[in-house]
Image (cartoon, coloured by chain):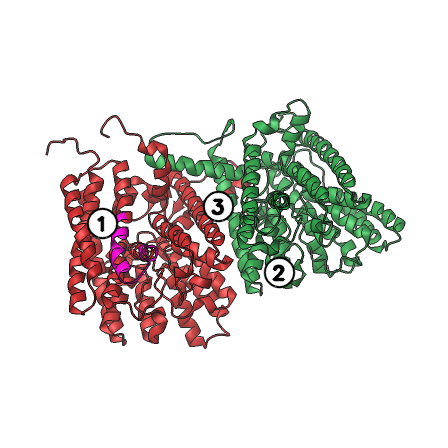
Chain colours: A red, B green
Amino acid sequence: MARRNRRGRFAPYVIGAGLAGLTLLMAVFGLYAAWLREPLTGFWVTGLLTGPLAALLLWYGHSQAEPTRRETFIGVMLLWLIIPLFGAIPFAYGGMTPVSAVFESMSGYTATGATALRDFESFPRSLFLYRAITQWFGGIGIIVLFVAVFPQLAIAGRQMFFAELPGPTEERLTPRLRHTAGAVLRVYLVFTIAATVAYALVGMPLFDALAHALTTVSAAGFSPHGLSLQGYMLPAAEWVAIFFMTLAGVGFLLNYQLLTGNPRAMWHSPELRVYLLIILVASALLFLALQELYSPGEALRHSLFQAISILTTTGYSSADFAAWPIPAKAVLVMLMFIGGSDGSAAGGIKIIRWMIIGSNTVRELRCALHPRAIAPLRIGGRLIPEEALKAVAAFITLYVGLVALLAMILAWFGADFVTAFSAAAATVGNVGPGLGLVGPVAHYSDLHSISLVALTFGMYAGRLEIIPIFVLLDPRFWRLPRRSR
Amino acid sequence: MRGRFAPYLLGVGLLALALVMAAFSGYALLLREPIEGFAITALTAAALGGLLLKLGVRQAEPTRREALLGVLLLWSGVPLIGAIPFVHGDLTVLNAIFESMSGFTTTGATVLLDFESFPKSLFMWRALTQWIGGVGIIVLFIAVFPQLAIAGRQLFFAEAPGPTEERLTPRLRYTASAVLVVYISLTLLCIIGYLLAGMTLYEAVAHAFTTLSAGGFSPNELSFAGYANPATDWVAIVFMTFAGANFALQYRAVTGKPLALLRDSEFRTYLGIILIGTLLLIFALWDRYPVLEAVRHSLFQALSIITTTGFASTDFATWPLPAQAVLVALMFVGGSAGSAAGGIKVARWLIISRQAARELRHTLHPRAVVPLRVGQRTVPEEVLRAVAAFVTLYIGLFAVTTLALVWLGADFVTALTAAIACIGNIGPGLGAVGPMLNFAELHPVSRGLLTFGMYAGRLEIVTVFILLDAETWRLPRLRLKARG
């Protein structure tokens, strides 16, 4: 095809495609709600708005094979803003305030799992399922983003991550997107079906089994039950969750290898080993801290469950950990700052980044004694360029800075110390529940509206790894280039 | 003669300590207070010091490792022996060491329960430990660490006063005297200031010692709140500002380059942070105090925390949460490099934030090469890496300490603020370790950990980790092995 000037058309295309998908979803859920005899106003209103808009954008937009960096940035960022915004409408019709609805929707599409829902009893089932689906799609979207888009853009050090799909790497973005999305979808489908069956086999009703499978596989954490998994009182279900959360927190590539019959390859990943080690250490610490509260068997289950739930930033709770002894809570807060493995739908800073920082720190300590010995950084035998190190350091700085800023805003608007700090960490890290007033059996809607808006932004920024957001703040970003590339 | 420098250094330190203890014995005699503590310490320090001097070897040019070991030993040995008078002042051994370390590291966290019956001479010794610790750390920061390229400091004082020769010792002497001039002058002016504001001579001296060293000990149980005197608060405000600023630059400013401070980007950032912190605090304290008081308390407390002094003009542990949040944020900043303030230091934050901005630009234009600049100078890669590693270790130590404290029974707020207040050499925290309380209630192991935290934080952590390196303990094979 002749290269006509298609500048600025990529973002509309992407958003149009997303909205088209949303419209389809609304149609499906409209039917589902009708079948359940539940109100469907929210769904068809949304569909009515997103449908025409999607058509317009798709007509105007053009699926460029190779958009510029700037276009890619804008496309990604607007996508994760616009879809949740429109996707919030069903929640508003379900009885939530606009601010809470947007919070909930963003919490869905960013696979966070923090809820502003007060009344679980009267909330329609169709909306619960929709809520779970938002997380499922959010998870897929984020993996595609991390695996196919960000490495090319070298965001936050990702150029160095081990996230390439096997097979020849498609150079151009859009075909690469399609190829990756297909692979992710397949893996997700397999895991979701397996999880649904597992949950159902241990005693969950089918609806709940599906709803949980959707949010377990995406390491997201929404549950139709107000008390999360604790509410089902099924220890077996908690073990199922433990299994699938662990898988969800592992890099997508590794999951792909597992399913395509190459499980040994998984073990080569240095990140996986550290991931498992952290789970082990954290569970052990929690186990010690929970001795007085539970019998050994229960303590083991709860420790393992909560350690994995927080590390993978899923956010399920098998117990009200906001009421746990302080040492246990402290361990959980620290886990919130670690994050899951790279290339998974887990949030947070990501283990591989901590590994890079750790390697540098050790190297610097050696350097302090032997100033001329500057060894290159290596992880798993692979060389880490200084570029990646700097990007990772900058990312962590911005991440922690954002958490601190949000915590201060929340404190300013009335939250107590623990609530403010844990809420900020739990939303930027896409974990879900925090401590204090935003604990696992509570909800975020008691916070001031401004706090909710700030946290919504936090979820968004944390999910997109913050750097793209800040790039928008650079005036140079908005300067129009002279030539097309 | 390898490995003999550290004992030599400690020996010198202990002998100096012995002299000071002798003086204090005299002072205690004058005040008709018990002198055993001082006398015993004097004898012990003299004996040990003499022994170490026999063992040690003075070296004109120690290796990196030896220099660092010397520093580590000095900052642990002197506080250890210097704790003896406190034991005689009725503290347990652990508490005495805590208090002594809190003095020599200019932290200002106290375990003293009974201020009434504590001898005046001991209060003065406590204040002096901070004054000595202050001048010692400034010299270390300005003259020694840059040479040793510790935690990125090689960038900070390329222009330290003194000859730009490579050799450590002549530069050290020159720098030390320059710093002492500024330090002593400011201390004298501060004493006069406090006198004019209404303090007694004793109080003025004790506070001047701990103001200029950004230490924070006070013979008054309620710190500055106990004087209920706005004038003393303002004097403290003025001199805390100086105490937290770069002493090398201050020397420059008074020896012919008056704009040296204002031209420095770190100093400007330092003032900027004080301003913003103060404004936020005023905003948060609007309802609590009348306007003028709010301004005074905000400025005082913002300065006190950022310079890691730790004085309290009022009980800020009872402040509304937004104000407390601002204080906690300030605890992580630290003062200017080249002052006796603790913390991560403004200069490092400047480097980190500029680097983050640079990374953002790089994300958009990956092929653009923009050097990192702070002030006039370009920041080399190695400094950047060293700063990143330092901050990582700092936060890591903070996290581990907080976790340990929580495990040993403290609540969240107490644990978190106690950890940062000690590692950052600030002094008081919030919760159970607030400015009107003390650290005595904490578990003994917690107090031990915090003592280590004060020590490690003061010596910029990297120094301490060197002890973990196996090579440090290995005896050299060849006599002529390359230095450093």
How far, Cα to Cα, is label 1 from label 3? 32 Å
Residue B253: % across, % down: 65, 26
Q: Quadrant of the N terminus of chain B?
A: top right
Residue B193: % across, % down: 75, 38
To which residue does mark 3 refer?
A361
- Say the numbered circle drawn on residue B432: 2
Part of the protein shown in magenta? A82-102
Q: Amino acid at mark 3?
A: Thr
Circle 2 sits in a helix, a strand or a loop, which is it? Answer: helix
User: What secondary structure is the stretch in magenta mostly built from?
Assistant: helix
In the figure, A403 relative to A202: above or below? above
In the figure, A273 relative to A158: above or below? below
A92 in magenta: yes
Question: Which residue corresponds to the image point at 54% horizontal and 31% vertical from the top-left?
Answer: B265
Circle 1 sits in a helix, a strand or a loop, which is it? Answer: loop
Q: Are marks 2 and 1 on the same chain?
A: no
How far, Cα to Cα, is label 2 from label 3? 33 Å
Q: Quadrant of the C terminus of chain B?
A: top right
Circle 3 packing at 10 Å, graded few (<14), some (14-19), many (20+), is: many
B122 in magenta: no
Determine contact: label 1, label 3, CB under 8 Å.
Answer: no
Judge whether residue A337 can be spotted in this image: no
